[in-house]
Amino acid sequence: MKIPQFITILILALATQQTLIAQEKKDKKYTIENCVNHFELDKAKKTNVGYQYWFIDKDFIDGNTLKMSIVDPHKSTHPPHKHVEEEFFFILEGTATFYLDGKTTTAGAYTSFYCPSNVEHGISNTGDTELKYLVMKKYTKE
């Protein structure tokens, strides 16, 4: 059976892409300077409801990210939504209400929430103090 030319080209393109990604990871130099990130308020991004600080952005480690979100009392970063990436939330301070697929639960510090891929979810500050939480997510290559 003869393989169509476009399939052969596609296979070669995918193999080349994987080789380039592997080489990029191999060439990346991880140092104590770029592997340690101390929180600095002046480097935080202001939002309409608080601010965000990226400890690890999607360009550092193969799409893996770690972000801290700080949300003012009785506010939400955005309405419930869904996306292909799964997400983990870890509450550091405050009171969070987590929405997942039509249901909600409220919890405080040292609680984690998990959101599977393509499931509607959201997190809100339902307390009277700032809500601080970590968001862990892996972005896919675009």
Image (spheres, helix red, strand yellow):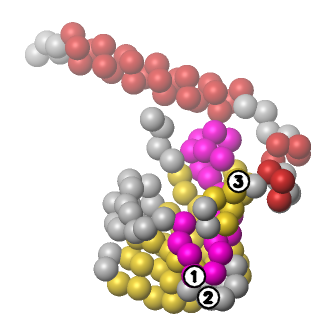
Amino acid at the residue labelled 3: Lys
Q: Residue furthest top?
A: 5
Spatial CA distance of label 3 from label 2 is 22 Å
Spatial CA distance of label 1 from label 3 is 20 Å
Q: Nearer the viewer, residue 10 or 63?
A: 63
The residue segment tinted magenta is 57-77
**Number of numbered discs overlaid on the protein picture:** 3
Crowd rating for badge 2 (residues with CA inside 10 Å; few <14, some 14–19, many 20+)? some
Inspect the magenta stretch and tell me whether residue 76 lies in it: yes
Q: Earlier in the sequence, mark 2 or mark 1?
A: 1
Mark 3 secondary-structure assignment = strand
Spatial CA distance of label 2 from label 1 is 6 Å
Q: Residue furthest front?
A: 48
Residue on which disc 2 sits: 127
Report which quarter residue 54 is drawn in. bottom right
Q: Nearer the viewer, residue 75 or 139?
A: 75
Closer to the observer: label 1 or label 3? 1
